[in-house]
Image: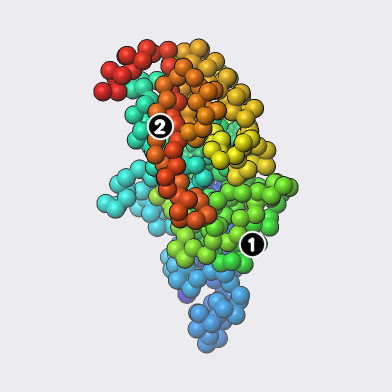
Amino acid sequence: MAAPVFDPISDQRLSDLRKRLGDTGWMELLEKAREQESIILALRTKTEAGSSLTRAVSEEGLDVSVPTIRRWIKRYEEKGLAGLMTRPGRTPEGHPDPIPSPSKRRTRKPRSFIKWAGSKASVLDEILAGFPRKFGCYYEPMAGSATVFFALKPKRAVLCDSNEELMNSFRVLRDHPEPLIALLEEQPNTSRHFYETRALEPSTLSPLRRAVRFIYLNKTCFNGMYRVNSKGRFNVPYGRIAHARICDEYTLRWTSEALRGTRLHTGDYRDAVADAGPGDLVYFDPPYLRPEASNPGSRLYQPDEFDHGAQGELARIFRELVERGCHVTASNSDHPLVRELYDGFEIKVLDVRRPINRNAKGRAGHKEVLIMGSRERPAERQLRLL
Ligand SMILES: C[S@@+](CC[C@H](N)C(=O)[O-])C[C@H]1O[C@@H](n2cnc3c(N)ncnc32)[C@H](O)[C@@H]1O
């Protein structure tokens, strides 16, 4: 194994990377590279003493696959520590390419970097068809995986969700995609690592490590669900997904670019839309009223409920925004209370497939409604939609 060729601290070729990531992100990458270097050196001692690489990896008790270790060694031999800080898919100078040219297979827009209950992937076309062609700022104040935002890719936008883990991941992905990708790439898909990661208390982690934990759990847990117990602890079991895409670099970089310039808000939807004004577009996708329950609300996202009272308050805000001159659209279940709350607005019924459901039968055949509110008169609207 050749000696390291250059040192990352003094290497000019990494100065752009450092500028882009900022000192904190860059130091995290360097720290990770140093960890990998110490593993490589420990394995080198063993292989030079006659052990095979596979045996040496198993003796060291490493949770990293042998092909991954081989890639590390190759990069380390070529560029030393700096080789461990940059990876393939980079510019010729070795700097990270924020958006590598998509291969022929990957020309479509990615939908979202996470799986989320209530994702709008199956009804995107209907939702987008109801939006005006021109609008000011786009607001998605109950964003979840923000499928509609990513399909629209607006120039100006505000995304909000009350889920702190989710919004932290959006923020880290927007501002520090490279260290996030580097750390996700190293996460093994094993039950042991899953439960160790799940046991970490998010509030004790740096925003970067917290985002890694959230995305990793989302990709490897059962059905990509987000569920917390009464103490607010994530409690979904390991999913045993053989080919989980923990680190989809293309989607992560594309998403990071799409989020650039977007205002991110963690908290209540009412605060997020406080400054929405005439011509802005607001899309609400709340936890739905469950059609079968008498006083339902969803516990799937947060321990606090989104019950009848909360649905009524949302409908009030919906009306207020329309009166302010915003174009407002909301999704909800086709429930008599929903129809009553939005009486007077245009309501369209959609047949929806729900991908996150315990059994496959429950994934098909639900009715949802799309409520559309705007000062535009219905006749003008009909003409525009033709
Ligand atoms: C049906 S999901 C949204 C799914 C999203 N449209 C997608 O494509 O993934 C509803 C979201 O509302 C969020 N939420 C619940 N109560 C909220 C509140 N008061 N303010 C903001 N977000 C809230 C939940 O955390 C959840 O992510």
Q: CB atoms at circles 1 and 2 under 8 Å apart?
A: no
User: Observer-nearest residue: 207 or 147?
Assistant: 147
Query: Residue 349: which disc?
Result: 2
Upstream in sequence: badge 1 or badge 2? 1
- Residue 10 appears at what percent x and percent y? 53, 52
User: Observer-nearest residue: 328 or 218?
Assistant: 328
Q: Residue at x 33, y 22 (%)?
A: 133
Amino acid type at circle 1 is Tyr
Give the SS element for disc 2.
strand
User: Observer-nearest residue: 376 or 288?
Assistant: 288
**Above or below — where is 221 with respect to 99?**
below
Q: Marks 1 and 2, how far apart in space? A: 41 Å
Q: Residue at x 45, y 46 (%)?
A: 354
Which quarter of the picture shows residue 110?
A: top left
**Above or below — where is 30 with respect to 121?**
below
Using the rendered image of the protein, determine whether residue 239 is visible from the camera's viewpoint.
Answer: yes
Q: Residue at x 41, y 21 (%)?
A: 346
- Mark 1 or mark 2, whichever is nearer to me: 2
Report if the beta carbon of the residue with label 2 is closer than 8 angstroms to ligand 1.
no
Q: Quadrant of ligand 1?
A: top right
In the image: residue 99, left or right of residue 292: left
Q: How many residues crowd mark 1 within 10 Å: few (<14), some (14–19), many (20+)?
A: some
Q: Residue at x 60, y 43 (%)?
A: 301
- Residue 218 appears at what percent x and percent y? 54, 52
Give the SS element for disc 1.
helix
- Residue 327 appears at what percent x and percent y? 44, 19
Amino acid type at circle 2 is Val
Which residue position is annotated with label 1?
A: 195
Using the rendered image of the protein, determine whether residue 9 is visible from the camera's viewpoint.
Answer: no
